[in-house]
Amino acid sequence: MATGFDPSGRLPDFFTSTGTSSFTQFLSQAAPELLPGRRPLPPGLSADIAPHGTTIIAIATAEGVVMAGDRRATMGNLIASRDIKKVHPADAYSLIGIAGTAGIGIELIRLFQVELEHYEKIEGAMLSLDGKANRLASMVRGNLGAAMQGLAVVPLFAGFDLTPGDVTRAGRIFSFDVAGGLYEETGYEAIGSGSLFAKSALKKRYRPGVSTEDAITLAVEALYDAADDDTATGGPDVIRKIYPVVMTATAAGTHRLSDEEITTVAERVVAGRTENPGG
Amino acid sequence: MAMQFYASPEQVQRDRSEYARKGIARGRSAVVLTYEGGILLVAENITTLRKISEIYDKIAFAAVGRYNEFEALRRGGVRMADMVGLSYDRRDVTARALANTYTQTLGAIFSETQKPYEVEICVAQVGASPEADELYRITYDGSVMDEPGFMAMGGQAEAIAGVLRDRHDASAELTSALTLAAEALGSVGGENGQTRTLTPKQLEVAVLDRRRPGRAFRRLAGPALTTLLGHESVPEADLGDVDAAPPAPAEAKPTISAASEDTE
């Protein structure tokens, strides 16, 4: 039996109470130790004890959004992982990527996925895209204590809005700060150490209403530029065939590009850069 | 001073059982049966208050009886499943564990409180083949039964189960399984023992799709259900007391997630 259960095996009262539709709020009653941000941390800065993930990009397209992330995790000057996946589906219509302390970020993603699915099952309807973003903001806020000790994690959230206020903007992107600030972005956004270079690349190439296909190439190009100038961002690894994780969210739901699809795009980008390293 | 009359424990249990059984028998019925492509759950329900719902990837919940009571159990089940799935792995959430918790909960309520829950619930888990499917029936007193491929709950469940017993075929297609379920539910409750023909709007239908990766639960409603049942659309007037139904929730919102196959 999992934590939080009565020794008799029956459901404790707070399981069956009407209570809340939020899973994290429920966990704070049933099993607070499963929630991040509640653990006491030893004093001092502990930034280098765990791997860090880096660059994530999101681009709004005509059909929805594209999100892409490189595959590198670093620990100080070491490469901790060459093939970490930092972009995940949050639910059927939204995507989440993380930059910062990988362990905390992955825990945040898992909890956020359960949070959305839980609400959907309890209420029989999905949260609105803004509702999801607000929920994520409060979860990031819960990590502020750890963030101040160097274990910061910042997500990037993007999704297809099923009930948009403006039909031309069905694909929406939300960024966050460590304090839980929530900002809706226009067009594109990047987070992580390589984001400066990725955003500079996107600034010159992004056009509103770009097709999903073009946005995928744009994202891979921008990640190439980030990896070019930032050691913590991994470029396309043609030796091991490790390429960025690229996902889309459109009216048809979320989709992760298959290895073949992304290999084709990445090899084309690499070939282009062989001709002209500046892109 | 009021006299305290002695009542034997047997008498108390009998009274509670009778009370619960009467409460359950008043409601409309539900059936759950396996078919070739998964598990089919059908409840006679003209309201938008759900009797059938998703618990987890491969697990669904169906209930009859008093709504507030089985809704509390359903929420508890979703919470338990999500908590176990988060602390271990998605594959570690099983219908048997859930059935065990429900039987303990209902058993305790039956023996320790004044009023037993007037509910009968089914926890269904879809497997790789019809033989691997699991159906658990948990009744108001906490007794649990592992059902062989089909079950009926609610008022006149015996008669409905009789129809299912004669005709259930685990290798049947969805269309024939659905037809059987609708006919079984319609086999009781007609005037002078006549059978009734249930329309799509009188049925709440969901399946646990064996071949669907990730979350297997899928509701069937609207045109899809009408087509499967082979019905033409039916005028509103033939539906009975529709007035009792609360306003429909926003139908445009899909409640099915396709993402969990790559959700970690």
Image (cartoon, coloured by chain):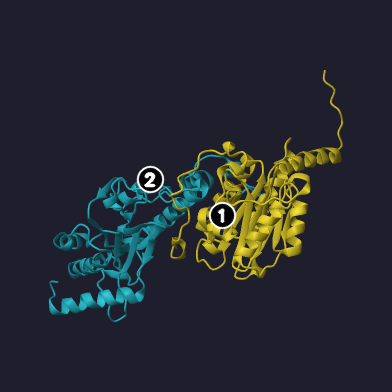
Residue A89 figure quarter: bottom left
> Badge 1 is on which residue?
B232
**x and y, in percent, of residue A18 in the image:** 55, 39
Q: Colour of chain A?
A: cyan
Distance of mark 2 from mark 1, alpha carbons?
A: 39 Å
Q: Amino acid at mark 1?
A: Glu
Secondary structure under badge 2? Answer: helix
* Residue depicted at x 57% and y 67%: B210
* Residue depicted at x 46% and y 65%: B261
Q: Nearer the viewer, residue A228 or A121?
A: A121
Q: Colour of chain B?
A: yellow
* Residue depicted at x 60% and y 64%: B174
Name the quadrant of the N terminus of chain A. Answer: bottom right
Residue A261 figure quarter: bottom left
Q: Is residue A27 above or below residue B6?
A: below
**x and y, in percent, of residue A210 in the image:** 22, 61
Q: Which label is found at residue A131?
A: 2
Q: Amino acid at mark 2?
A: Gly
Q: Is residue B154 among the parts visible in the rendering?
A: yes
Query: Horizontally, is B130 left or right of B18 in the view?
Result: left
Residue B70 figure quarter: top right
Disc 2 crowd rating (10 Å Cα; few below 14, some 14-19, many 20+) is few
